[in-house]
Amino acid sequence: MTTRSTRPADTYSPLYFLASLGAGGLSVTFFMYLMFWVPHPGKPVPTFEDISAAFATGGPALQAAIVIAVLGIAAMVFLNIKSLLWNLSALSAFRKTKAYETLRNSNAESTLAAMPLALAMTVNALFIVGLVFVPGLWSVVEYLFPLALVAFAAIGWIAFRIIGDFLGRVLSKGGLFDVTAHNSFAQMLPAFALSMVAVGLSAPASMSVNPATVGISLILSTFVGTAAIVYALLAITTAFSSMLQHGTAREAGPTLMVVVPLMTVLGIMFLRQNHGLHGFGVEVGAGDTMMLTARLLAVQVLFLMLGMLVLIRQEYFKDFVFGEKTSPGSYALVCPGVALSVMIQFFVNKGLVGAGLVEKFGTAYWIVTAVALLAQVAMIALVLRLNRQHFSREKAATVPAE
């Protein structure tokens, strides 16, 4: 006699790439500790040397923050890569099934964009690992930027190919897209993937001192970022019409908040581009940065309110987070919380502190920052909860040995 075990993740969906994405995003929330609390004079980001010096000379609070950040980054990047490798293997097997052919001929074909989305997030996460754990990395970083541009360009090509296959199928002939099933923001996933590629392409613009590298970074990230914005606007407007007629698809409810991570990713791209434009004589003031981050945060709060309103009315959390039901789309709940945490950190440090409206490490500073930290803790708990739900094995009834 043998006992078989099953788990929800055994019924594969490309949306499981969001599990990898969420873990990678959480590594960024821990990097925010180092980015804004560790001094890094002369460099746009902290490196191993800056972190080591701050730990050696800082007080107990800073030392504790550094330890938490370093351990958090290591743990979340491990989960990110582990989940990515599992997904790539599972997707390879999934492509050989009839279920894959069914997916390729439905609205859900766009969920394949979750793969380049997760790939781009992992490249970003690995760059963070290099900054934090590799001594002397900054001395060779100018040689790494072209490689990073090539990597993100390749991932962008994958994303555009997936989008091209989808749009080519549904736009070349009528009747191949189910408008009644378009009652969510699920079709925003390709735009999210493009925005993640764009923010990766924009990194050299804010860090390189080579004008050619900065220029290429600015141009490529602008192209891909613009494509993401155009696609997002089309997806939102068409989806809203369907939702008003048919209501929001219950299992796809979390996608209503996908605008939140989209704003954070594009916002970081804008900030990086603004920094890169300094080399071309374009100066962006502290007040401009404060208003940019404030506007982005306002859009995020509005869509968070909309998404939470619908999810609570539909009792989504009761069934799919705290209940017995499972849906791969539940991992889409992680992205908004992570993105909100990161955007608040930028709003406080680059916006409010940069404009002189709030004193760094003052009372008002920590009150607002506490919101970012609470969102981070909540998303860590959510990731662990969802991983147990979807990837833990449950014993089934005993069956005769074969």
Image (spheres, helix red, strand yellow):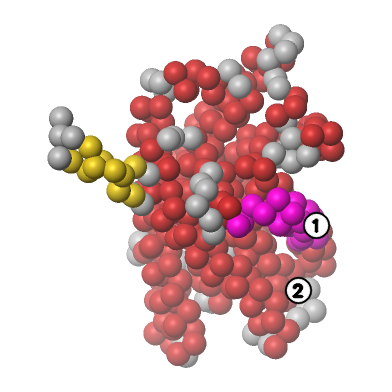
- Which of the 4 image quadrants contains residue 238? top right
Residue type pointed to by label 2: Leu
User: How packed is label 1: few (under 14 Cα within 10 Å), some, or many (20 or more)?
Assistant: few
Above or below, 4 relative to 163: below
Q: Are marks 2 and 1 in contact (CB under 8 Å)?
A: no
Whether residue 51 sits left or right of residue 296 in the image: it is left
Examine the residues drawn in magenta and state their main secondary structure. Answer: helix
Question: Which of the labelled discs sits on residue 370, or is there none?
Answer: none
Whether residue 61 sits left or right of residue 215 in the image: it is left
Q: Is residue 221 visible?
A: no
Q: Nearer the viewer, residue 328 or 341?
A: 328
In this view, the mark in front (2 or 1) = 1
Dot 2 or dot 1: first in sequence order is 1
Quadrant where the C terminus is found in the figure: top left
Residue occupied by mark 2? 352
The x, y position of residue 118, in whole percent, is 50, 43
The x, y position of residue 201, in whole percent, is 58, 43
Q: Start and end of the magenta stretch? A: 297-318
Residue at 48% across, 42% down: 16
Distance from label 2 to label 1 (Cα)? Answer: 20 Å
Residue at 41% across, 56% down: 388
Q: Is 305 included in the stretch rendered in magenta? A: yes
Q: How many marks?
A: 2
Residue occupied by mark 1? 302
- Mark 2: secondary structure: helix
Q: Nearer the viewer, residue 364 or 179?
A: 179
Residue type pointed to by label 1: Leu
Residue at 34% across, 42% down: 6
The x, y position of residue 285, in whole percent, is 80, 64
Q: Nearer the viewer, residue 399 or 225?
A: 399
Q: Nearer the viewer, residue 204 or 346?
A: 346
